[in-house]
Image (tube, rainbow, N blue to C red):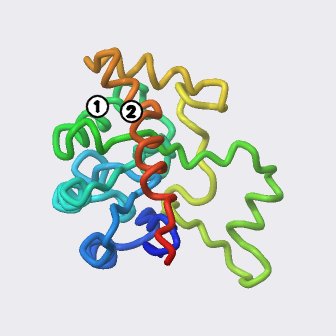
Amino acid sequence: MNRIGMIVDLSHTGPITSMQAITASERPVMASHANAAAVWRHPRNLSDELLRALADRGGIIGCAPYPHLTGGDEVTGRQWAEGVAHCVEVMGIDHVAIGTDSSHHFSDDDLRFIREGYWTHEPNFGAGSPDKPGWLPWPAFFRTPADFANFDTVLSEVGFDDAERAKIMGGNLMRFYGEGFNPQLP
């Protein structure tokens, strides 16, 4: 993967596999859509130890407003931005971005197929849990892609300056992708 310029993504791996991938990869890896487990306890969110290891090797996290990863659709923009601030405290400003895990472009039938598919006869709720199965509504500050500008607003509200917000809003991802999608073929 490193040689052909494919980015390793940890978003659906457990903590042991994540640490192994961070350590084994010769290039920085990412968690394209996850959050800090210290803020929101969920098996797909990353511990501070993993966040530090990711940053130490040049990696990046895309903080997600996805309701299953933030404790539900009641999370406010400010609460989400405080979760981003935690990641910045642990990792540094150059290693944090936005990774919505948005599936707004899918129809309900598409989402049902993704979750249940032809390969199973049982629903597979993925990030869902027994008490919140299926698809939760998106939080009020991010209901459609048209709400993307709200991220800039809530990041400002928790104290990120213009330069820091520019990095989180896309600058860090552009740099990371520019370096990562770079094959090193003979």
Residue 141 x, y percent position in the rendering: 53, 25
Residue 140 x, y percent position in the rendering: 55, 27
The residue lying toward the viewer, choosing from 147 and 184, is: 184
Question: Mark 1 or 2 closer to N-term?
Answer: 1
Position of 69 compared to 90: left or right?
right
The residue lying toward the viewer, choosing from 158 and 161, is: 161
Look at the picture and state if 1 lies above or below 27: below
Look at the picture and state if 97 lies above or below 10: above
Across the whole image, how many numbered discs are drawn on residues?
2
Q: Which residue is mark 1?
A: 82
Tag of residue 93: none
Residue in the image at 66% along x and 48% along y: 103
Residue type beneath disc 1:
Glu
Q: Badge 2: how crowded within 10 Å, few (<14), some, or many (20+)?
A: many
Residue 154 x, y percent position in the rendering: 40, 20
Look at the picture and state if 181 lies above or below 84: below
Residue 183 x, y percent position in the rendering: 51, 66
Residue in the image at 17% along x and 45% along y: 90
